[in-house]
Image: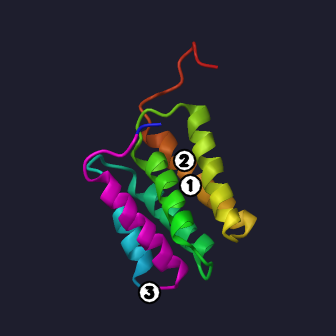
């Protein structure tokens, strides 16, 4: 998996804090999370997909304890789902699974975590430039 470049590590830290603020029920946190997910890097993304992911994360994290390490892990998974443009279908599915597992680990309900996974997979599938070719399995 590619590593964050330039300003991206700082933006990942911002997303990590946004996730903790969402978990803590800060009223401005969902809007800040959406903004940071939208502006992770300059590449445009489908706004409806980013909003869907942000809402699913807000629903999954509400009133859940979110330690720094878990928030960082979630933010890194989100970076991969949103900013990495060359994931294969199987890598995208794995990123979604990693997101769902991280959310369930912190106490999110399985169906809400699955909704976040579905949103992340849909977003990553739309932005990837690594489209399946005849020689891929």
Q: CA distance from mark 1 to mark 3?
A: 22 Å
What kind of element bears circle 1? helix
Magenta stretch: dominant secondary structure: helix
Q: Label 1 near label 2: C-beta < 8 Å?
A: yes
Range drawn in magenta: 3-26
Question: Which residue sits at x=62%, y=50%?
Answer: 98
Name which of mark 3 and mark 2 comes first in the sequence: 3
Local crowd size for mark 2, using a 10 Å CA cut-off: few (<14), some (14–19), many (≥20):
some
Res. 38 visible in picture: no
Label drawn at residue 23: none
Q: Which residue is mark 1?
A: 119
Secondary structure of the residue carrying numbered label 2? helix
Q: Which residue is mark 2?
A: 122
| Residue 39 on the magenta segment | no
User: Which image quadrant for residue 31?
Assistant: bottom left
Give the crowd class for mark 1: few <14, some 14-19, many >=20 residues within 10 Å.
Answer: many
Q: Residue at x 52, y 52 (%)?
A: 77
Q: Earlier in the sequence, mark 1 or mark 3?
A: 3
Q: Position of residue 78 (x, y in %)?
A: 48, 54
Residue position marked by numbered label 3 in the rendering:
27
Q: Looking at the rendering, which quadrant does residue 60 occupy?
A: bottom right
């Amino acid at each position: 998996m590619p590593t964050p470049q330039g300003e991206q590590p700082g933006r990942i830290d911002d997303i990590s804090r946004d996730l903790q603020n969402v978990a803590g029920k800060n009223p401005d946190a969902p809007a800040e999370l959406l903004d940071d997910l939208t502006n992770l890097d300059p590449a445009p993304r489908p706004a409806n997909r980013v909003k869907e992911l942000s809402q699913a994360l807000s629903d999954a994290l509400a009133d859940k304890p979110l330690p720094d390490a878990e928030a960082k892990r979630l933010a890194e998974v989100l970076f991969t789902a949103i900013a990495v443009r060359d994931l294969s279908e199987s890598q995208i599915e794995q990123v979604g699974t990693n997101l769902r597992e991280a959310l369930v680990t912190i106490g999110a309900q399985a169906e809400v975590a699955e909704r976040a996974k579905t949103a992340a997979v849909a977003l990553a599938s739309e932005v990837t430039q690594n489209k399946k070719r005849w020689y891929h399995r």
